[in-house]
Amino acid sequence: MVSAQLEIPLETVVEVVRSLAPGSRFVLNPSPPLPLPAEVLAACDPLIVNEHEAKVILGGTAAGDGPEEWAELLLARGPRSVVVTLGGEGALVASADGVARVPSVRVRAVDTTGAGDAFTAALAWRLGAGEPLAQAAAYAARVGAVTVTREGAQVSFPTAAEVAALR
């Protein structure tokens, strides 16, 4: 399992993709967003985007469309799966098997800093543990929900016990 974001140079991400061992899984959250080369898109399983990131990768063609359409358009560009994060509305997962919404838990958001990072890390961890995409995304949405209830980035990331206690 390899997880990356675009806080490192895109050229580095391209080299990581080229160096992936057979059978490995590549998770990418393109934040901050940039148009992505076809070989990077093809390696993603999943590509994790929010609305802004989806629109940048799609070259603005997603304007006015909903997350289901963004996911379908992104899948057509090569990723094996796509996750669209929807903040308080949870997430949407899409692959060749179909599209499904994953709900979130309602919380009082204090600070959204780091929520995407926490979501991505939790999703990659659960996928690496063998969970199906929708199940891993549901867990990641819970991690994101706990994260936004606290100030700061890394200090707001919850423990597994805190995620399990979320109602």
Image: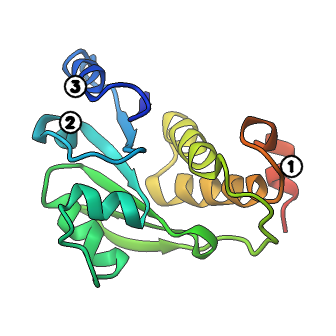
Q: CA distance from mark 1 to mark 3?
A: 36 Å
- Amino acid type for the residue under numbered disc 1: Glu
Q: Which residue is mark 1?
A: 162
Identify the residue shown where x is 58% and y is 43%.
117
Determine which residue is flagged by label 2: 40
- How crowded is the residue under tag 1: few (<14 C-alpha within 10 Å), some, or many (20+)? few
Residue tagged 3: 14
Question: Relative to 105, is 27 on the left or the right?
Answer: left
Q: In the rendered image, which quarter is residue 98 located in?
A: bottom left
Going by the image, does 112 lie left or right of 45? right
Q: Is 53 above or below relative to 42?
A: below
Q: Quadrant of residue 139?
A: bottom right
Residue at horizontal 88 percent and vertical 57 percent from the top: 165
**Of circles 2 and 1, which is in front?**
2
Tell me how far mark 2 sits from mark 3, CA to CA. Answer: 6 Å
Give percent across and percent down for residue 121: 57, 39
- Amino acid type, residue under disc 3 in the picture: Val
